[in-house]
């Protein structure tokens, strides 16, 4: 594989996390704004962390079914490069958020089986990027960060949607190279797969993940 695999480390909560992601060579860092998540940060915490993010590394805010009031507050306080919509937002809502905030929007789409692929095209028409993730279990509290993978063969030969896309869901340093090989992904996203315990990032795991993705 080539070295042009772009990596997003999501759910950062400390300046040490930001430093680890940046020094490992991550292209994106993600901050989670979802109270149920063990990776949740406040607007003020994220604003402080954003200062530590080097130029050239994109700052992404993960939100779940956020209304305009929430997004107004977020974008007023935290300097961002992209909004990641990780709930059940419709294509119309994606277009609305993009127009209202003038930021690129990445839409997460959960995949469990082939029937879930059809919706991707509708989101590709309005989003700037797509995040193809494992669909959460039926009663899950979290829409992502569950450490689940999906059947990567579903994506084989589907490399070319009309916008860039990122593979997520259960990725670790041990399986990311295989995931890239099977799906043709040029971007990958990891959260729980680089944690020593739930919600706590591990600098060694981050470095190993980026190295494995780009090997």
Image (cartoon, rainbow, N blue to C red):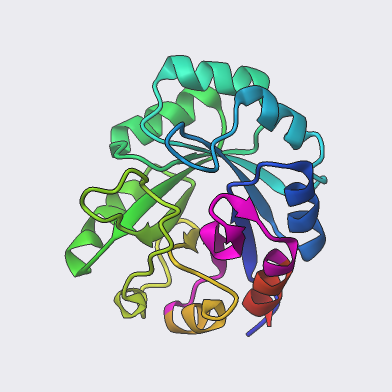
Q: In the rendered view of the protein, which quadrant contains the C terminus?
A: bottom right
161, above or below 142, in the image: below
Magenta extent: 183-206
User: Number of numbered discs present?
Assistant: 0
Left or right of 121 in this view: 67: right
- What is the x, y in percent for residue 88? 29, 39
Q: In the rendered view of the protein, which quadrant contains the N terminus?
A: bottom right
Q: Which residue corresponds to the image point at 35% horizontal and 74% vertical from the top-left?
A: 155
In the picture as drawn, the residue positioned furthest to the left comes out as 115
Which sits in the foreground, 49 or 153? 49
64, above or below 193, in the image: above
192 drawn magenta? yes
**Which image quadrant for residue 22?**
bottom right
Left or right of 32 in this view: 135: left
**Which image quadrant for residue 20?**
bottom right
Q: Which residue corresponds to the image point at 52% horizontal and 59% vertical from the top-left?
A: 192
- What is the x, y in percent for residue 67? 39, 21
Q: Is residue 136 visible?
A: yes
Q: Is residue 124 visible?
A: no
195 drawn magenta? yes
- What is the x, y in percent for residue 131? 44, 55
86, above or below 157, in the image: above
Left or right of 56 in this view: 190: left
Q: Which residue corresponds to the image point at 56% horizontal and 70% vertical from the top-left?
A: 186
- What is the x, y in percent for residue 24? 77, 64
Which sits in the foreground, 148 or 76? 148
Q: Which residue corresponds to the image point at 55% horizontal and 56% vertical from the top-left?
A: 191
């Amino acid at each position: 594989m080539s070295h042009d695999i772009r990596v997003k480390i999501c759910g950062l909560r400390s300046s040490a996390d930001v430093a680890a992601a940046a020094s490992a060579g991550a292209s994106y860092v993600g901050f989670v704004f979802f109270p149920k998540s063990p990776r949740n940060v406040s607007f003020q915490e994220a604003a402080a962390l954003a200062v530590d993010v080097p130029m050239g590394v994109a700052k992404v805010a993960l939100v779940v079914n956020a209304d305009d009031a929430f997004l107004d507050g977020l974008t007023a306080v935290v300097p961002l490069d992209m909004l990641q919509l990780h709930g059940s937002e419709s294509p119309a809502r994606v277009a609305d958020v993009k127009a209202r905030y003038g930021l690129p929007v990445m839409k997460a789409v959960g995949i469990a089986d082939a029937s879930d692929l059809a919706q991707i095209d509708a989101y590709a028409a309005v989003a700037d990027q797509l995040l193809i993730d494992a669909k959460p279990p039926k009663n899950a509290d979290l829409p992502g960060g569950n450490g689940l993978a999906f059947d990567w063969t579903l994506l084989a030969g589907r490399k070319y949607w009309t916008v860039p896309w990122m593979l997520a869901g259960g990725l670790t340093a041990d399986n990311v190279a295989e995931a890239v090989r099977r799906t043709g992904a040029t971007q990958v996203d990891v959260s729980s797969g680089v944690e020593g315990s739930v919600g706590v990032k591990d600098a060694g795991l981050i470095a190993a993940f980026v190295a494995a993705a780009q090997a």
